[in-house]
Image (cartoon, rainbow, N blue to C red):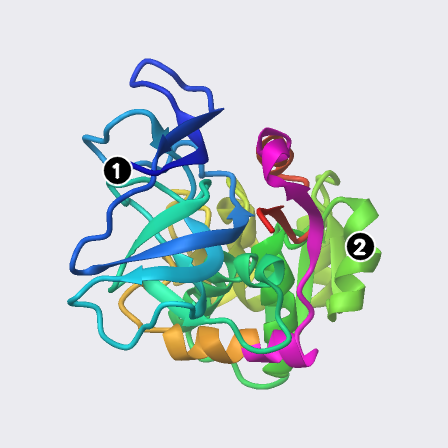
């Protein structure tokens, strides 16, 4: 049986991640086996796990690589194809490994020409979440406004750019050091979330409130609700629980909508330079624990990626 390197949770009583050697998973009829070339690092990677797993268990949900084997019941894919994918809640292990199993019905997108594996691995989770969050919004006309709470990370970086492309004015919160960065992405108003008076700044910018808000970071939904106009929408990406007021709808990203085609288009826009992809740092695979520690600070600008190439 072939073995591979993987960052794993070694046992049920362990909450730490360590580098180990585990068998290469066997591909089933409805699965793909992918040779992983790069991994998108997320804050949930070490604890977003399916039930009843076997240990040691490789962590991770997002990656890019080359299809090594195609299960007999998976149409439309071939060995050697370059793909980016999300493989969450996979009993056979996650993506922080030299090989990963992907169910054929998972979010899988081809990597366009001109996009590296490292770039491709940075897109699926953040891009998918952004696109689904937009589908959850009530209609906003061109010239309307939106507030993004916690905008300097991977999701916020996409939200600001795609909102501006729709003709919306964008206010965004981040630490002061990231204000120039957000302005370079198209934000028209920036506020420092450390300043307790930032909601007043938004209200001065839009006296009736913004049309909608996207609360990316935890504990930002209530404050976002306060700057949205009566009858507007707050999409809580962070999953905060708040009591709606003034007719404002508080909703989660829409997971009933298939955004695969939109995600393919987004990756093509990144490849052509129409949308800016920001990767703060690419860590070699052996330094994966440093990458995880970085994202857990919630201070990464854009995305953090592991490279196996």
Residue to which mark 1 is pinned: 50
Whole-angstrom CA distance, mark 2 to mark 1, is 38 Å
Residue to which mark 2 is pinned: 179
Residue placed most toward the observer, 106 or 226: 106
Quick one: which residue is furthest to the front in this view? 1
In this view, 89 is above or below 127: above
Which quadrant, please, contains the N terminus?
A: top left
Q: Position of residue 9 (x, y in %)?
A: 39, 25
Q: Which residue is rendered at x = 31% and y = 72% of the image?
A: 257
Q: Are marks 2 and 1 in contact (CB under 8 Å)?
A: no
In this view, 182 is above or below 112: above
Q: Position of residue 4 (x, y in %)?
A: 42, 37
Left or right: residue 119 versus residue 86 is: right
For label 1, the SS is loop
Q: Is residue 53 magenta?
A: no
Q: Which residue is rendered at x = 24% and y = 46% of the image?
A: 26
């Amino acid at each position: 049986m072939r073995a591979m390197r993987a960052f794993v949770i070694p046992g049920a009583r362990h909450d730490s991640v360590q580098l180990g050697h585990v068998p290469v998973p066997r591909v089933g009829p409805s699965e793909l086996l992918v040779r992983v070339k790069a991994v998108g690092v997320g804050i949930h990677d070490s604890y977003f796990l399916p039930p009843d797993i076997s240990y040691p268990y490789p962590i991770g949900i997002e990656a890019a690589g080359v299809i090594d084997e195609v299960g007999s019941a998976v149409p439309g894919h071939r060995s050697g194809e370059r793909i980016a994918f999300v493989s969450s809640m996979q009993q056979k292990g996650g993506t922080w490994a030299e090989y990963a199993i992907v169910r054929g019905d998972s979010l899988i997108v081809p990597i366009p020409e001109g996009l590296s594996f490292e770039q491709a691995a940075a897109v699926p989770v953040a891009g998918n979440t952004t696109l689904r969050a937009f589908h959850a919004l009530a209609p906003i006309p061109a010239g309307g406004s939106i507030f993004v709470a916690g905008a300097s990370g991977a999701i916020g970086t996409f939200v600001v750019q795609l909102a501006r492309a729709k003709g919306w004015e964008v206010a965004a919160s981040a630490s002061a050091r990231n204000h120039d960065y957000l302005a370079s992405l198209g934000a028209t108003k920036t506020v420092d979330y450390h300043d307790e008076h930032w909601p007043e700044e938004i209200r001065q910018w839009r006296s009736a409130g913004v049309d909608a808000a996207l609360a990316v970071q935890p504990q930002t939904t209530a404050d976002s609700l306060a700057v949205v106009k009566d009858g507007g929408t707050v999409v809580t990406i962070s999953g905060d629980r708040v009591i709606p007021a003034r007719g404002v709808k508080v909703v989660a990203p829409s997971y009933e909508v298939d955004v695969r085609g939109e995600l393919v288009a987004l990756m093509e826009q990144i490849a052509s330079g129409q949308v800016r992809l920001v990767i703060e740092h690419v860590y070699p695979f052996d330094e994966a624990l440093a990458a995880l520690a970085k994202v857990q600070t919630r201070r990464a600008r854009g995305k953090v990626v592991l490279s196996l190439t």
